[in-house]
Amino acid sequence: MDVINPATGEVIEKFVTDTPQTIEEKYQEARAAQPEWGALMVSERVEYIAKFRELMKRDLDTLALDLTKETGKPLQQSKNEVLGGINKLKFFLEKSEEYLSAEKVNEDGNTEEFLAYDPLGVIANISAWNYPYLVGINIFVPALICGNAVMYKPSEFSMLTGRHITRLLHEAGIPEDIFVPVYGDGSVGALLTALPLDGYFFTGSYPTGKKIAEAVAGKLVPVGLELGGKDPLYVTEDISDIEAVADAVAEGVLYNNGQSCCSVERVYVHDDIFDEFITQLKKKMSAWKVGNPMDESTMCGAITRRSHLDYMKAQIEDAKAKGAKVLLGGKIIEGKGNFFEPTLLINVDHEMDVMIEETFGPVIGVMRVESDEEAIELMNDTDFGLTSSVYCADEERGEEILSQIHSGTGYLNCCDRVSGYLPWSGRGRSGLGSTLSKHGLYAFCNPKGLHIRL
């Protein structure tokens, strides 16, 4: 399989992909090795992850360079992603032993009752290309710490990064038959769903997540799905610095070319400040330079998947046909590589695909609203439920608005961020289960109740 640089269209490397035979062999080796790994103390497994973290620091520049080559994101953003992964690992290093230790929860006469945690066994991690370090760490790190063997399939659009992750984990001391890479396209992922694994964890689109859930439903094993979003953001009329908020919104829309499940996907602005906000947002988005991701001045690099250019173009054409106005951008940038103009639309509504279907690119529609109630109704008018944001000067008002939004994460006066200490979970088409926080550790365990009679 060819690894293609989306900024140039050139083949970077040819990868040998897995076959049904190699996948079966890897599974059998992982199954045989897992009990010994699962028998280690949590503190021992955490120590391997601590070594992995140090190796990520050591190889930062190499990791970022290959990430940019294969995904097209600007080099500084690639460095930021690796550094973000290093930072996120702090949670697991600090808290895993505490959360996974057996806990005495009750005494009943001469019987003590304990809550303990066993590993699931051998799990699949079918990962994503847009943030392969950040979304991968959400899955394979807690899975390993909890004592599981991991069959790890990186996306076919980030196989260089998948190879780096594998190399560093093995160098850190994690056995090769405990963290097992599987390379290939979606057909290889489908082969993993046919194996008798003990859990399936996928990060990616809703349609693929649904297929995986349906394919493994009969196995009655845990399924974790980190899927997409149509993340809304509401700007109230009482904000004092419209320019600063517009700057934050522009970053929420355009960072990583909008190729993030928690990117700002639709914006609602109170009528009293709408015109001024649009003026500032257009100004801020215009400043995001599109170009060579190796250039330090580039803020928007290449779109990773070439087919996605036509998808975004179709969303914009649909919106225009239904009355939307393009204030900025709106077109594919001709030439080598997969480039798209940062795009700002107004006069949008929920009859348009751009306001109801995930865009996953540097395109945003902004809609005028007259009240909090209207904003809340529109923000909830979606099949997705990943994140939602409110910019508001009144903290109590902002929190009240967020409390009425059906999403797994709420942001007040910020957007598009993730913390290892908080659960990352979606509702509706945004997924099943949680990663990160203590909930993200328990997702990779079988809880066990122990009744110890003295």
Image: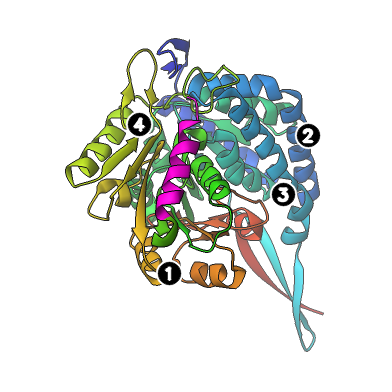
Residue range in magenta is 274-289
**Residue at x 41%, y 27% (from the top left corner):** 303
Q: Name the residue beneath numbered marker 2.
A: 51
Residue 11 appears at what percent x and percent y?
A: 44, 11
Res 188 quadrant in image: top left
Label 3 element class: helix
- Give the residue type at disc 4: Gly
Q: Mark 3 points at which residue?
A: 92
Relative to 111, is 355 above or below? above
Q: Residue at x 80, y 41 (%)?
A: 47
Does residue 294 appear anywhere in the picture?
yes
Q: Position of residue 207 (x, y in %)?
A: 32, 46
| One can see residue 229 in this view | no
Quadrant for the C terminus in the image: bottom right
Q: Which of marks 3 and 4 is nearer the N terminus?
A: 3
Closer to viewer: mark 3 or mark 4: 4
Specify whether 70 is left or right of 360: right
